[in-house]
Structures are given as structure tokens and as C-alpha cells.
Image: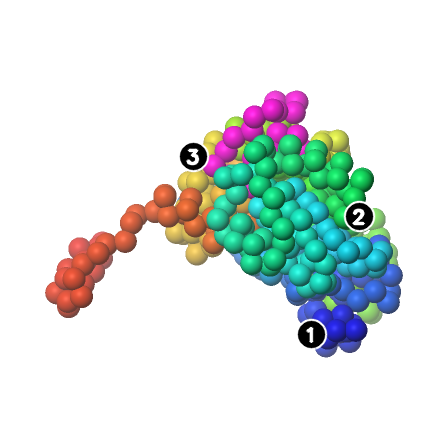
């Protein structure tokens, strides 16, 4: 047993979401988690965005870009790879727009397994490609989009001894549902509206599973120790957790099958993470939307990039373009009154902005170059003070 495989004694320090929520996950008690300390991400209240300040609405962002590989995928990957080890697997495979491949590569490395990742050639952000390469996965670029890759890996996993770790793997969704648990614990109640980007539709599905699960077992949490998790979430009252949020899914206009009501052959958007035309969790996401009385809507690439910049400039939060669609959509729906005053809103920021430096640099003011002299530097400062 390597040091990475040694179970952490419970209660000492935060050691990842498998240890904290094991009793809510389909893993054996004795299986050591393949973990990098994922989960436990901050829930940050927006305070400077004018459109939010103008209304009596509280908006928090769940910054999932602060996971170990800088996206929400790590929540599902820790469970999927832990399960893969439990089942004696030797290799994992996925198709990806970039984040799943980065996460699969990292967790496979941690578990000393092989990883094969299929990505659409030229259509994944630079940081994500660097991650998959650095973690030593076999990167296979296909001359086709994510949906084509997905169709391939599903067939390959049927025929070869490799475990599929896309979100069609149920353990992925089980891990990702823990984000809903954390939000309830951090907010002290479920939000009224949960806004998130939708691509392959696993995340909206997983959050809904999490909220439903939390609301279905309130009675269990009435003893002095939390019977729900092994952490220190404290007790939440039955009344509070019985509520569930409306699930609001936002898509990029060029890749919005849920808005068109049908699968798309040629999705296109600057938010490459959600450049998906054939979501695998199509039915489940519709159910989440319907059962929660939520809705789907779309944002243009311009709106997405504007929201990304707004978060970075006004709040100091740098998320990737796909993540910003949740805030772009929420701001618009708050402005319209579709999300009414008095509401508590949570937006998921799915990935970190450093994943996609090209898109960030393209939309920013370029640096000013001056000579290395006091006067030259001083002039720039004075010119830019107001
Ligand atoms: N945001 C980011 C940053 C993503 O990477 C993804 C999906 C989503 C949102 C959409 O989440 O698919 O659960 O609806 N990325 C996948 C990938 C497809 O391969 O990394 P979803």
C-alpha cells in the first residue's frame, strides 16, 4: 500500500469529499479514496456587480474552479476513479471538451492507472491540454467534436478493458451531487434558484440528485452528531432542508440543444467547454428542470464574455467562459424579474479562468510597454489614476 492509499483518520482535517460524504456514496467502507482534496470550495457572495446591487437579491457563486485540477469535474472523478480501483480496473477513458480529460488524467495518475482521453482537435483551451499532457495521459485528438468522441469512447469501453469516466458513469454524478450538500451547509439552507451552465448536462442532473437526497432525509439530522456526513456541517432544521431550488440551466446560443428542443449536429461557441450538441444526460436534465419548476435559457458568446470580464473586474473572481454563462443568465433573469426580489441565488462557476488564457488575453487591454525609467512609469500611473 502506498502512502497515497492509506486511509486518513476521520475528523482530523478535511481530506476530500469521499471521506466526508462516504455514507452518501456507493463505495465500500474500507475502500481508500483516490483523492487530491477536492470539494469544500468557497461560496462567495457577489457584492460589486451593479445589476445585482440594484435589486434585493442575494447572489452567491460556488467557485468550483478552486478544485485540485481547477474544475468541478474532480468531484465526480474522485468517486469514479476510487470505484475503478475498487473494481480492479487498470485504465480509464473519456471524451472531453477539456476539463474531464484534465481531471481524469490527474486522478488516474494518482491511482497509478493509465488514462486515454479523446479531445476535439484545436477546440480545447490551452491550460486543459497542458494538464492532460503533464499528467501523462494518452491524448488522442480527433478530427471531430465532443459528441463524436463521446460516441467512440462508449463503444470502446464496451470492447476494451478500459473504464469510461464520462458522466454517463453513475459514480461521476454521485460525486458531483456533493456540491449541492455543500451549498446547503454553507448557506444554511438551499437557495431559491440554482443557476448553472449546461453542456453534457451531467452537472445539473447531479445537483438535482443532491438536493433531492438532502431534502428526503431531514429526520436523520436531528441527533447531536450529523448523521448525514462525517464532517462538521452541524444540524440543519427539517423545515429548511425540505425545500429545493429551482434549477436554471443556461447554454451558449450556438450550442443550445435544450432551447432548440432537439440534438444539434454542429454546436459552436467561444465557451469550448460547453460546445456540445448531443447531451448525454438529456432526459435527466429535462426531469430536473421540470420537477424543480426551473427553466433553460441561452446567452450569446458576447454576453458570456461580458459576464466573465465583469466577475474578474468587479469581484476578483476569474472563471472560464463556460462558467460565466451562469452569471450572465442570472443577471438577465434578475433584471427581468423572472428571479424575483428577495431570492437567494447560487451560480456555479464550473472552472477556473486560467484554463483558457487565450480567450482571456484576447478580451483584455494589452500591457503597456515603457522604458525602465522612473518618469516613464510615473506617467503611466498618473495618466491612469482616474
Ligand atoms: N462548465 C465547464 C467548465 C465544463 O467543463 C463543462 C463540461 C460544463 C460547464 C458543463 O457541464 O457537461 O455537466 O453539463 N465539460 C465536459 C468536459 C463536457 O469534457 O470537460 P455538464
The relative height of residue 15 versus residue 187 in the rendered view (above or below) is below
How busy is the neighbourhood of tag 3: few (under 14 within 10 Å), some, or many (20 plus)? few
| Predominant SS of the magenta segment | loop
What secondary structure is found at the residue carrying circle 1?
A: loop
What secondary structure is found at the residue carrying circle 2?
A: loop
Mark closer to the chain start, 1 or 2: 1
Q: Residue at x 56, y 58 (%)?
A: 134
- The CA distance from mark 3 to mark 2 is 43 Å
> Which image quadrant: the N terminus?
bottom right
Q: Residue at x 80, y 40 (%)?
A: 159
Q: Position of residue 128 (x, y in %)?
A: 54, 50
Disc 3 or disc 2, which is closer to the eye?
A: 2
Q: Are marks 3 and 2 in contact (CB under 8 Å)?
A: no
- Which residue lies under the disc numbered 1? 13
Q: Per the image, is 269 magenta?
A: yes
Q: Position of residue 200 (x, y in %)?
A: 65, 37
Q: Are marks 3 and 1 in contact (CB under 8 Å)?
A: no
Q: Magenta region: which residues?
A: 260-279
- Which residue lies under the disc numbered 2? 161
Q: Are marks 1 and 2 in contact (CB under 8 Å)?
A: no
Q: Is residue 329 left or right of residue 94?
A: left
The relative height of residue 97 versus residue 351 in the rendered view (above or below) is above
Residue 236 in sight in this render: no
Amino acid at each position: 500500500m502506498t502512502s497515497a492509499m492509506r486511509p486518513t483518520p476521520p475528523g482530523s482535517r478535511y481530506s476530500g469529499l469521499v471521506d466526508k460524504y462516504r455514507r452518501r456514496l456507493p463505495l465500500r467502507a474500507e475502500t481508500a479514496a483516490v483523492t487530491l482534496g477536492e470539494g469544500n470550495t468557497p461560496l462567495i457572495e457577489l457584492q460589486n456587480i451593479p445589476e445585482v446591487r440594484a435589486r434585493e437579491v442575494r447572489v452567491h457563486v460556488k467557485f468550483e474552479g478552486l478544485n485540485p485540477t481547477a474544475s468541478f469535474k474532480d468531484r465526480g472523478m474522485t468517486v469514479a476513479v476510487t470505484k475503478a480501483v475498487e473494481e480492479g480496473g487498470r485504465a480509464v477513458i473519456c471524451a472531453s471538451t477539456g476539463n474531464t480529460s484534465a481531471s481524469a488524467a490527474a486522478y488516474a495518475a494518482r491511482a497509478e492507472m493509465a488514462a486515454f482521453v479523446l479531445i476535439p482537435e484545436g477546440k480545447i483551451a490551452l491550460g486543459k491540454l497542458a494538464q492532460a499532457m503533464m499528467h501523462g495521459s494518452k491524448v488522442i485528438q480527433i478530427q471531430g467534436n465532443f459528441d463524436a468522441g463521446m460516441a467512440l469512447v462508449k463503444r470502446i469501453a464496451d470492447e476494451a478493458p478500459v473504464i469510461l469516466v464520462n458522466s454517463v458513469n453513475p459514480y461521476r454524478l454521485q460525486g458531483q451531487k456533493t456540491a449541492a450538500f455543500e451549498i446547503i451547509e454553507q448557506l444554511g439552507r438551499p437557495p431559491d434558484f440554482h443557476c448553472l451552465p449546461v453542456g453534457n448536462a451531467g452537472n445539473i442532473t447531479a445537483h438535482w440528485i443532491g438536493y433531492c437526497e438532502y431534502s428526503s432525509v431531514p429526520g436523520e439530522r436531528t441527533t447531536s452528531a450529523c448523521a448525514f456526513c462525517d464532517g462538521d456541517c452541524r444540524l440543519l432544521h427539517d423545515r429548511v432542508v425540505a425545500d429545493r431550488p429551482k434549477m436554471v440551466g443556461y447554454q451558449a446560443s450556438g450550442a443550445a440543444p435544450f432551447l432548440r428542443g432537439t440534438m444539434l449536429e454542429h454546436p459552436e461557441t467561444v465557451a469550448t467547454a460547453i460546445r456540445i450538441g448531443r447531451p448525454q444526460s438529456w432526459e435527466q436534465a429535462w426531469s430536473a428542470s421540470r420537477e424543480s419548476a426551473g427553466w433553460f435559457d441561452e446567452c450569446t458568446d458576447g454576453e458570456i464574455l461580458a459576464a466573465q470580464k465583469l466577475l474578474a473586474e468587479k469581484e476578483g473572481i476569474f472563471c472560464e467562459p463556460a462558467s460565466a454563462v451562469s452569471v450572465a443568465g442570472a443577471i438577465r433573469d434578475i433584471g427581468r424579474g423572472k428571479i424575483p426580489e428577495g431570492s437567494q441565488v447560487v451560480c456555479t462557476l464550473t472552472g477556473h479562468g486560467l484554463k483558457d488564457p487565450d480567450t482571456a488575453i484576447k478580451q483584455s487591454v494589452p500591457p503597456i510597454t515603457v522604458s525602465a525609467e522612473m518618469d516613464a512609469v510615473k506617467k503611466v500611473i498618473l495618466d491612469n489614476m482616474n
